Image (cartoon, rainbow, N blue to C red):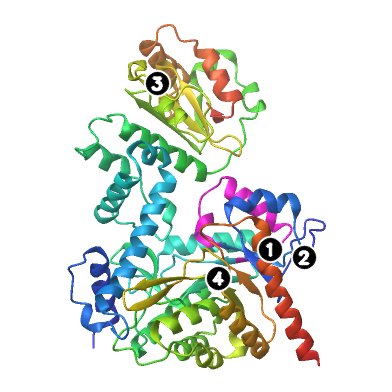
Amino acid sequence: MPSLREVQTGLARALTDASAVEVLPWVDGAGLGPVRRLHLYRNNARATLAGALADVYPVVRRLVGDRFFRQVADRYAREVPSGSGDLHAFGDAFPELLEALGETRELPYLPDVARLEWACHEVLYGADHGPLAPASLAWVPESQWGLLRFRLHPASRIMASPYPALRIWQVNQDGWGGAATVDLAEGASQVLVVRPRREVELWPLSPGEHALVGALSEGCTLLHAMDGALSVEPGIDGSGSLTRLVAGGAIVEARL
Amino acid sequence: MAAARNGERPGPIPASAGIGLRAPHYHALLETLPPVGWLEVHSENYFGAGGPALAYLEALRAHYPLSLHGVGLSIGSTDPLDPEHLTRLACLVERFEPGLVSEHLAWGSVGGRHFHDLLPLPYTEESLVHVTARVGRVQDRLGQELLLENPSTYLRFTHSTIPEAEFLTEVARRSGCGLLLDVNNVYVSGRNHGFDPRTYLQAVPADRVGEVHLAGFAANRHDDAEVLIDTHDRPVWPEVWALYAETVARLGPRPTLIEWDAEIPPLATLLAEAGRADRILAETRRALAA
């Protein structure tokens, strides 16, 4: 008689590899053979994982089509097993698989669109936080502002792409009423994905703003972060950007 | 439905019909606050640190009793219990003060790999000892009784020696847990394995059953054979309603959940199903009083 451990590892192998046979003699075949009974479970598990990826990556699915998406999703589920009982944690490395695929070379922006979708997914479930209290800056003398360090909203991610990933994401949203095509010549895009209120927001950033937010999120002082932003984008209105980040709720804490 | 007063939350789960709370209904429920007895959620859907799902649940919790129903703890697995999963569940219990907390007699992971499915156990003495110990650990961690649900199964193991109803009864007796009796699952498994669901239902100890589940299934034909799949994507079938009426006549009225997790219908459809369960519960009460 197999141990419980043997049954579970055997069944797990049969779920991931249809040619695994060790579990077959342990399965009661009355009415329907063991192979077909295992097939039912294999299909259920596959559909659940592919469904979870389709929920997180609707734009990627729309761009590559249903059938190809299902193929890639199945491959992902085989190669990058879910490591948590929380299905929301599944799918983080999907952009890397898309990047490695030969078939999607004609859609070079696809991995970045996927990264943007994963960022939205993480931000949707990230911690809530209120805006920066104005009083928390009132006591800082102006001469010390350069030494301030900021904390970004816990539900926020930034990303940059050499492609217009944000525009591609936008035109593929349900209910989008604008032009349905994106000219790849629009070039690079930078995005802050943040949830200062109930819903996820996508803020387009200039290259300098992206550098600014990136440096602030790493704990750099405002002075250092501004220097970095200016070197990327000499014309940047740094104080305007900072005001927008604070007023919009993307920056939630300041300290000296 | 008990209305929220002075910030007090509605308390225990009443012996009436409840519905599974799913995202498409958040807004409509909050706007209309229909008179449904209670709500149940999949615990793992609220494992995030924040976000709209938790905010809606918080708002709805002020108006309805709540039950937490887990699908990912993998109680039957031979892997160690995931301490992070348990911690998140414990945090939800602390925050939302659910009237009931439940999980499945099943496993979903081994060797660290999660299948996100309710996989069947061989019903042996080894499994019984294992599941009993795990249920005990979960109850200790949560400081709360757990209800264990009978799963729908599509295969059985040749070395199983204990009928499922007896297995559940014994886990409940040894661990002190309660049972969540899914009448649809009994029907589905009965048809899939050729046993009489009535024999199964009569073997379940009435005093252990803290909740009943009802849902719809799909029938898949495979050439010469038919397999029922527990899809939760349609109304409860007439034969399951009939079994349900017989079951509550024996058990007495119990909190009864309408589960509908895929192809989610308008809220009104779900409430109509709950209304049907409530009418059966009312008839049961009248019959018991007579």
Identify residue type, mark 2.
Met
Between marks 2 and 3, how big is the CA–CA gap?
53 Å
| Subunit that carries the residue with mark 1 | B
Q: Which mark is residue B215?
A: 4
Q: Dividing the image into 4 quarters, which one contains the N terminus of chain A? A: bottom left
Identify residue type, mark 1.
Leu
Residue A126 in view: no
Outermost residue, top direction?
A235
Q: Which mark is residue B271?
A: 1
| Subunit that carries the residue with mark 3 | A
The first of marks 4 and 2 along the sequence is 2
Q: Which residues are magenta?
A: B42-67
Q: Residues within 10 Å of mark 1 (few under 14, many from 20)?
A: some
Q: Which mark is residue B1?
A: 2
Read off the residue under disc 3: A211
The first of marks 1 and 2 along the sequence is 2
